[in-house]
Image (spheres, coloured by chain):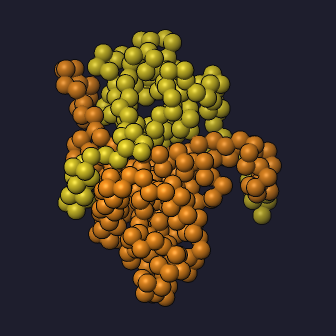
Amino acid sequence: MVFGRSKGGKHPVEPVTLKILVAGGFGVGKTTLVGAVSEIRPLRTEELLTEAGRPVDDLTGVEGKHTTTVAMDFGRITLREDLVLYLFGTPGQERFWFMWDELSEGALGAVVLADTRRLEDCFAAVDYFERRSIPFLVGVNCFEGAARYPAEDVRRALDLDPDVPLVMCDARDRESVKEVLVGVVQHAMAYAAARRRSPVTT
Amino acid sequence: MSADGQARLHWFDDEAGPVVRPYAMTRGRTTSAAQHRLDLIAVVVAEPHADDPEADTTLSPEHVDIVGRCRETPQSVAELAAGLDLPIGVVRVLVGDLVAADLVHVNRPVPPAELPDESILRDVINGLRAL
């Protein structure tokens, strides 16, 4: 590109990469949240699925289609030349959980985005991260026109453990999303520290 | 209208799917011998001596493309897949080939179940705040 090929012996910086997952129901604003802080337009990666999805996917009109794709949107934040954070929006449909397993491997933590009008849509995500002991934070995306509920009510409705942070946010707003992400990392740190203190808690 | 009906019956361009089926590029392989599953955020780095991959006739255009992209800037597996518009599984196999050919190496992210250093997490928080 601008610099063309580098002929010299200068090695490119090999960054440390980290990832945070963004989960939640369909249309809750996952990609919007990623886009609000990502330095690149959210990219899309796909994985092919074959016959397995057939009984479930509605293929009316596209009967000739034998494969379907799971798409994941992701964004990138270069914090330092040698430190890069990726944000991955998890595929909305629950039957793509095998992709979640792969995505959550090695993840720093997760954001579960919730919409108070359809709170039940994020139950599955909350449950998923709880079971796998992945530190997560619930961000209530304050949509315009949606009734505001006190945090305590939302917390009770989701049956959250007391140590799981819950914040009100606006997925379109960069500052708000930054705070959400800082919250996730802080929670992950506290979580790791608690685990070190009492490694065997079953 | 009829145009609408036509569109339903026939697929054109991108809708018809790729001209070369994705896994044809890997010659049907879904895993590569040398590499266990590469993480989506594993970073692929071109080796300094890999400055003319096109000269290697055993490489496919996609292989050459990957080396070219990674020579400019090291890239994660996810970014490569998005940039090349290929499924992640295909990119993993192709990267595996390139590792075997000693044209690239892969920096694995922090291993699962091992949280990164507290100092790195602090750097992340500071970095986010400074955005």
Q: What is chain A's hue in the picture?
A: orange
Q: Nearer the viewer, residue B24 or A110?
A: A110
Residue in view at x 33 percent, y 59 percent:
A194
Q: Nearer the viewer, residue A112 or A155?
A: A155
- For residue B96, side relative to residue B27 (left or right): left
Q: Where residue A119 appears, x then y in whole percent?
A: 56, 76
Note the chain letter of the yellow one: B
Residue A143 drawn at (x, y percent): 46, 79
Q: Total of numbered circles in the picture?
A: 0
Q: Nearer the viewer, residue B21 or B14?
A: B21
**Residue at (25%, 58%) from the top-left corner?**
B125
The residue depicted at 26 percent of the width and 25 percent of the height is: A5
The answer to whether residue A76 is visible is no
Position in image of residue A9 (x %, y %): 19, 20
Left or right, residue A155 beside residue A27: left
Residue A162 visible: yes
- Image position of B5 (left or right of A136): right
- Measuring from the top left, give residue B61's x and y in whole percent: 50, 23
